[in-house]
Structures are given as C-alpha cells and as structure tokens.
Image (spheres, rainbow, N blue to C red):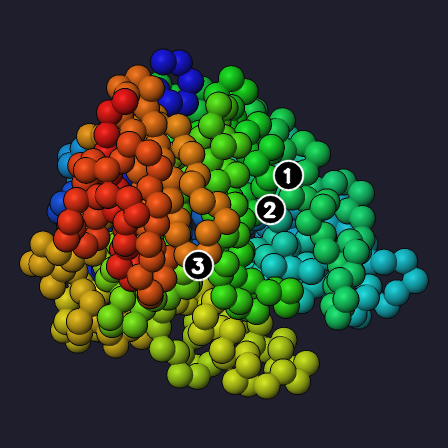
C-alpha cells in the first residue's frame, strides 16, 4: 500500500527520554548520556523502536535545554560528542533508532547568532536573524506598554525584551532568554538546514521539532485581542500556523529530509494545530512531516483561567476530541498518540486514579485506550511504571521556569498562595520531571549525588526493579501492548469506530482491518464503579487479546466491567 500506512514508523512505538531526569552516571545529580547507555537494555526489554531525546545541546538551561546556545555540540552536563556517538551506536546496535529534539523557533540569547545580532546593532549583518522592532511610538522605551506589540510570552509577562544599547526590542514567544529566530530570512533557514544535515550525517534517525508551527509570524506583528482580566494580547492568531509555515516545512523537507537516504521519523510539536492543518502537514503527497503532536486532548481539563486552572475531565469531551482526530486523519495523514511528555502532568494522576487501590489498573487502562488507537504511540519515561504527580510541599520544590514565573505573577496579583500551589501541583511540568524511579533505594537509583529535583517519595513502591520482577506490573503490561503493535496489523491499519460517544464512563471503540478481516473491540471503564454495557452484535465468546484484569467469565452481552477494567477482544469477519 502506498502512503503513510506503509511507512516504517506506522507500527513503531517511540519512547521519550528527558535526559536530565533519566539516569545520572557521574553523581552530579543530573542525568547524562552515559547514564542512558547503562539503561538501554531496559528500553530494549520494553520493546520500543525509537528513542526521542529531549535537548542535550549546550545551554544556559533557563528552560532546561530548550534554550540552545550551540546546535552542534553536547552540553558538558550531559557528556561529550564522543559519548553521544557511543550512545547512538549502542542504540543502533539494539535495533532501535534515535530522534533528536530540534529547537529552532528560538535559540538561547547566549547563542553566537543572537549575540552577533544584538551586539552588531540595528544595521549589523546578523540583525535580521532575529525579530527586532523599535518601541511603540510615543512611549518611553523600556517602560510597560512601550513594547512593539501587546503579545504575552508563553512563560508570563511581555513577549518582548528591551535592549538598551540599540534602543530596540527583540521578540521571544517563550522566556526572555529564548529569542525567536526570523524564519523569513533565507540565511536563517539555510543555517538551520545545514545543522540538521550535520546531525543526520552523524547518524541520527530524525527529529522531534519543538513548537515548529510557530516559526512563521505575520510580518505586521499586529496587536492581539486582550482577554478579560489580562494585561496582554493574544498573539496566537498571528503566529500559530502563520502565513509561510507550509512553505518553510516543505522547503526543509526538500533541503534536508529528501537529501538523506536513510528512513527518518519527523514529528512536529504544534500547539493550537487543527485537524485540517494537521492533515496538510502530514499528507505524504505534500512532503512535509510524518506526524504532528496536537494538544487538544491535554487541554480538556483546563478551566477558563488557563493552564493552571485545573478542572475534572469529562470523558465525553475526551472521546469527542480523540475521535475527531482519528477520523480526521483516517484517509490522509497520520496521528501521533500520547498522554504524557516533559510538559504534561502525569496522566495516571490526571485522567486516571493514582490512589493505591486503582493506580496500576487505571495506568493500564489509559495505556490500553491510547495504544489501541490508530497512530504512532509515544511513551514518556516512567509512564510505563505508572509514575504519578509529585507531592510538592512548597514553591521551593519547583524548578520549572513556567511554574516559577506563574507563581511570581500570581503572587504579585494577590492570588492566595495555596490556590497557586494547588494549580501547580496539578499541572506543573515538574510533575513530569521528577527523576526516573529505578529502584526503592535512596534517590530511586537515579543518582548517588543530590538530584536536581527531588525524587517522588513513592519510589519505594513504584519503581522499575520491582516491576521487572512482577509479571503483572504496569511495565509488563506496556511491554505486551508494544509487542501487540508489532504483531497485530489491525492496530496499525484498522479503521477506527467510536462506540457510545455519549456515555460518561465507558470508552469503547472498534478497529477493523479489512485486509485481514480482523476486528478488535476495546472496552474501558473510566471510573471507580462497576459498569454494565451492552455489546455490539457478534462479540459473545470472542477471544481476549489483552486485558488489565483476568476474565471471570466469557464475554457475553450485557457485560459487567469492574472499576477501571479495560479489555480488548478479537474476532474475524
Ligand atoms: C516546547 C517544549 C517545552 C519548551 C517550549 C519552548 O513546548 O516542549 O518544554 O519549554 O517548547 O522551547
């Protein structure tokens, strides 16, 4: 079959490593590349096909490495280029692939490109590599409101920082130490392409592309609408999938991906992307990207107050959203499937139930639902153990710039400390960044030094060592799901059909592969109470493919599902 269904990554599972928190080999409290090498057998045992490494490049670490000061080296915190080559060889030696994080919407303000752009002044040769603008007319430069437009940074505060020396502002959609590159400048694009080719020649197998749909800005940089209660304007309409985005991605495909003989994986991180846009990005005929990360489903438990205003998830919303992406990218394009990454709170705490009675079961249920969808599943480190959110006691326990800025901003506005902390506990990115829980020992076997962020105290019971030894663990359940992705073609190719979309507690769907006649039925009880469901016709006495609880009786309609029970059945038609 031509098209995306035939691509090698269509039956692959990707595992994301956040190196800083994965495994520390030199006791400085920060994970590193040799630490990853030591744990590759664990990942091979899990059975994943591809590793995606969050950034390991030199960086001042204002945003934990997503602020890169040199694209063609390794930060000494993580090791050396020689360590990287050893890691790559060891990954390939185990039949896995390695995908790099590509962060090119912005650099660090300590990158030589930016220092040249800043220090050369308004007429300097590198000035136009970044987005510089004079202050708003009639305003005192450097004072609030004098910014060239009213956009807010994703990390709180204005999206512009004033440079005294030149009297101009530079744009940063993220922190002030992450100036946005000017993609409208062809020299910038050529420099990025050359850097990407350099990594491909070194042997890497593709890229996860950080906020790549933000690279094309409306050149007029218009003011955004100011939402009620905010000091800043909403700039997204002017740079989320901006005017030249498809041109730039297609050019990158031509100049980089198409020039490379090896089979790559490219995935674009795209906040705010719609199904229609995603279809354009991932239509193989258009030669842009293999798949994108969309954010709709991880925003469904957010209230009107923004990211830290957590609300309970309504299952009907989740099904409507994921279902729409399934059908939207059915004929053309491809989905990536994820619950977790280094920016999201832990899914078992968020959409599952992390109390001791239901934790493992709900972690397995979430895994079942996600891995049975059509698309490429991503597992974020520790998700395969059912790692949960951390019990942060005070603001001193947080490390993330987004969380700390939010806390500072809200405190200044007079929001009660406990209210701010409550939001952070539920939604802070630091929940994903506590160290990987390898064993029950001190610091969870992550480091023999002092970890840069505290380990979750629950590592005494939730850890890899214990789970490897227990055939019924969350780890072994993930391992079986990953194996199914490799052995059951209906997971890759089957059509997706949602059942009972209006049911508040049941997530049920079928996958049907016309080529083999195999049909799968997925039943998941998203809650702590039992549930009786009517089965569609023809499923009585069908075989169990995988389930998070042993069956007590053959499948017959009506069927009772126990709390957080998930079952997958198979038949041929
Ligand atoms: C992406 C990354 C996030 C980072 C941001 C700015 O969303 O995943 O961690 O802070 O981009 O680079």
Residue 246 picture location, percent across and down: 61, 29
Q: Mark 2 points at which residue?
A: 272
Q: Which mark is nearer the camera, 2 or 1?
A: 2
First in sequence: mark 2 or mark 1? 1
First in sequence: mark 3 or mark 2? 2
Other residues around mark 2 within 10 Å, as few (<14) / some (14–19) / many (≥20): some
Other residues around mark 1 within 10 Å, as few (<14) / some (14–19) / many (≥20): many
- Identify the secondary structure beneath mark 1: loop
Res. 106 in view: yes
Residue at the (53%, 67%) spot, across then down: 311
Q: Name the residue under label 1.
A: 241
Vertical comparison of 79 with 269: above or below = below
Q: Name the residue under label 3.
A: 344
First in sequence: mark 3 or mark 1? 1
Mark 3 Cβ and ligand 1 under 8 Å apart: no
Residue at the (36%, 62%) spot, across then down: 527
Label pair 2/1, CB-CB below 8 angstroms:
yes
**Mark 3 and mark 2: span between their CA atoms?**
16 Å
Residue at the (36%, 13%) spot, across then down: 1
Viewer-nearest residue: 30 or 509: 509
- Identify the secondary structure beneath mark 2: loop
Vertical comparison of 69 with 147: above or below = above
Vertical comparison of 8 with 1: above or below = below
Residue 502 picture location, percent across and down: 50, 49
């Amino acid at each position: 079959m031509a098209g995306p269904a035939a691509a090698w990554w269509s039956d692959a599972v990707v595992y994301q490593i956040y190196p800083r928190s994965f495994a520390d080999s030199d006791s400085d409290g920060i994970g590193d590349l040799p630490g990853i090498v030591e744990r590759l057998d664990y990942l091979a045992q899990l059975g994943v096909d591809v590793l995606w490494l969050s950034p390991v490049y030199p960086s001042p670490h204002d945003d934990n490495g997503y602020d890169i000061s040199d694209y063609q080296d390794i930060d000494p915190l993580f090791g050396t280029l020689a360590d990287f080559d050893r890691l790559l060889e060891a990954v390939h030696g185990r039949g896995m692939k390695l995908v790099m994080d590509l962060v090119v919407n912005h650099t660090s303000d300590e990158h030589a490109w930016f220092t040249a752009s800043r220090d050369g002044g308004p007429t300097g040769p590198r000035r136009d590599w970044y987005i510089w603008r004079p202050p708003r007319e009639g305003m005192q430069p450097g004072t609030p409101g004098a910014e060239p437009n009213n956009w807010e940074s994703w990390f709180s505060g204005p999206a512009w920082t004033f440079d005294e020396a030149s009297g101009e502002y530079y744009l940063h959609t993220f922190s002030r130490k992450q100036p946005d590159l000017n993609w409208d400048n062809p020299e910038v694009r050529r420099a990025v392409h050359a850097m990407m080719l350099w990594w491909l020649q070194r042997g890497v197998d593709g890229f996860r592309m950080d906020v790549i749909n933000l690279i094309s800005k409306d050149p007029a940089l218009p003011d955004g609408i100011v939402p009620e209660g905010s000091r800043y304007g909403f700039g997204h309409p002017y740079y989320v999938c901006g005017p030249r985005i498809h041109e730039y991605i297609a050019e990158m495909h031509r100049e980089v991906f198409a020039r490379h003989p090896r089979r790559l994986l490219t995935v674009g991180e795209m906040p705010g992307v719609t199904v229609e846009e995603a279809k354009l990005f991932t239509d193989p005929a258009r030669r842009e990207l293999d798949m994108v990360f969309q954010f709709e489903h991880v925003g469904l438990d957010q209230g009107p107050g923004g990211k830290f205003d957590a609300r309970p998830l309504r299952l009907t919303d989740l099904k409507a959203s994921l279902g729409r992406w399934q059908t939207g990218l059915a004929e053309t394009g491809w989905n990536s499937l994820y619950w977790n990454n280094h920016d999201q709170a832990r899914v078992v705490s968020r959409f599952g139930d992390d109390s001791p009675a239901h934790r493992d079961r709900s972690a397995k249920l979430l895994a079942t639902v996600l891995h049975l969808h059509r698309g490429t599943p991503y597992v974020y480190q520790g998700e395969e153990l059912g790692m949960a959110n951390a019990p942060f006691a005070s603001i001193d326990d947080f490390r993330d710039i987004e969380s700390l800025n939010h806390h500072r901003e809200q405190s200044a506005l007079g929001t009660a400390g406990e209210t701010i902390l409550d939001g952070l506990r539920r939604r802070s990115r630091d929940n994903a960044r506590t160290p990987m829980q390898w064993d029950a020992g001190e610091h969870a076997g992550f480091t023999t030094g002092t970890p840069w962020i505290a380990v979750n105290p629950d590592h005494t019971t939730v850890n890899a060592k214990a789970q490897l030894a227990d055939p019924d663990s969350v780890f072994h359940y993930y391992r079986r799901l990953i194996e199914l992705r490799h052995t059951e073609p209906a997971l890759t190719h089957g059509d997706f059909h949602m059942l009972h979309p209006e049911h508040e507690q049941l997530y049920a769907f079928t996958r049907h592969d016309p080529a083999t006649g195999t049909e799968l039925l997925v039943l998941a009880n998203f809650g702590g109470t039992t549930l009786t469901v009517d089965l569609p016709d023809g499923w009585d006495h069908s075989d169990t493919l995988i389930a998070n609880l042993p069956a007590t009786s053959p499948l017959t309609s009506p069927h009772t599902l126990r709390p957080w029970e998930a079952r997958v059945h198979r038949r041929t038609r």
